[in-house]
Amino acid sequence: MDGEAPAGEKTANGDEEDRDEHGWFEAEVCIVGAGPAGLTAAIYTARAGLDTIVVDGGPSILERNAHLENVPGFPGGVDARRFLRGTERQAVDAGARVVDAHVEGVTQDGDQLVATTADLSIAANRLVVASWSDCSYLYPLDVATKQRGTKTFLETDGDGRTSADDVYAAGRIAGIPHQTVVAAGHAAEVAMTVLYDADVPFYHDWVTPEGYFTDRGRDVPPGCEEIDAETRRERESVSRERQRALLEEPPDEPRTHPSLGDETDPEE
C-alpha cells in the first residue's frame, strides 16, 4: 500500500516484470484474500522460504471496524485499517508479493493450480483460500462446501486441507469465527499445514539470542535463527521506525455496511 502501483499490482514485490511473456505469475503458494487470515498465512509461508503471492480482491471486511480493540499487543486498541497496512507490509518484508486482482476461476493444470483474473494468471503448487464470502471461483475443482443459512463455507479436514488436492482454507471461509485474532491464528495453523505438505524442513519460526541452541551443542533447527546483540538492536531499531511511520500515517475512515452505501459486497 505504499504509493501508487500499476494496474494489477499492489506492492513493489508484485512487479509487472515478474510476469512471463504471456502475463503469468509463478509461485509456490498463491493466497486468495488479503485480510488478516490471508496476510498472516503469507507471513508464515514466505518466512519459511516458499515463494508466495497474495491476491487482494478488494477491501477486507475488517476495514468496516471503527476501532480494533481485542488484538493482543495494542493497549487501547488500534485503527483497523492501519493494522491491515502493517500486516501487509510485514508479509511483503517476509518476501510475499501482493497484487490487486479479483480471482474469477481456479483450474488444475498438471501439477499446478492456476488462478485467473481479468488480466492475469497465477500458477502455483498450492492454493490457500482466505477470501470471504465468495468461493464460487473454486467450483471447477468441485471442492466440498457446507451451508450455514445463506453463507457457504469450505469443508476442511481440521488442518486446513479441503477436498481438492493442494487447496487449503483459512479464516472465515473455513467456518472460523469472525474475529481478527482467531482468523489470523487459524491462518498460521493452515500455513504450517502447507509447509508440512510441501516438505519444508521446519521446527518453528523463532528468532533466538546467540547461543540459545549452539551453546548447548545443538544445531539451529530449521526455521529458527540465532542473532547476536548487535543484530537484535538493529532489528529493534528498524521495528521502531516502521511502527512510528505507520502511526504517523493519517487514519482512513472506516467503511460502512454495503447495504448503507453504494458497495455491492455481499458480506454480512
Image (tube, rainbow, N blue to C red):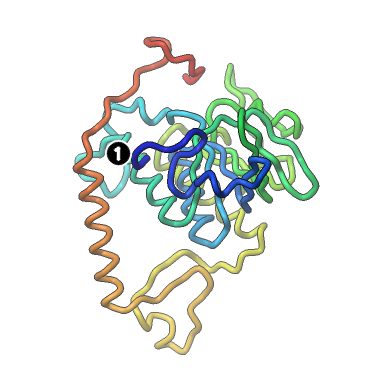
Q: Nearer the viewer, residue 213 or 111?
A: 111
Q: Residue placed at 39% from the left, 31% from the top? A: 62
Q: Residue 76 is drawn in which quadrant?
A: top left
Q: Residue 133 is drawn in which quadrant?
A: top right
Against 232, is 72 above or below?
A: above
Q: Residue placed at 41% from the left, 55% from the top? A: 93
Q: Name the residue under label 1.
A: 82
Q: Which residue lies furthest to the front in this view?
A: 21
Label 1, secondary structure: give it: helix
Q: Nearer the viewer, residue 58 or 152?
A: 58
Q: Nearer the viewer, residue 268 or 14?
A: 14
Q: Residues within 10 Å of mark 1 (few under 14, many from 20)?
A: some
From the top left corner, tell me how far across and down residue 206 is, in percent: 42, 67
From the top left corner, tell me how far across and down residue 152 is, in percent: 61, 25
Against 111, is 175 above or below?
A: above
Q: Residue placed at 35% from the left, 80% from the top? A: 210
Against 74, is 141 above or below?
A: above
Q: Residue 162 is drawn in which quadrant?
A: top right
Residue 158 appears in the figure = no
Q: Which quadrant, please, contains the N terminus?
A: top left
Amino acid under disc 1: Arg
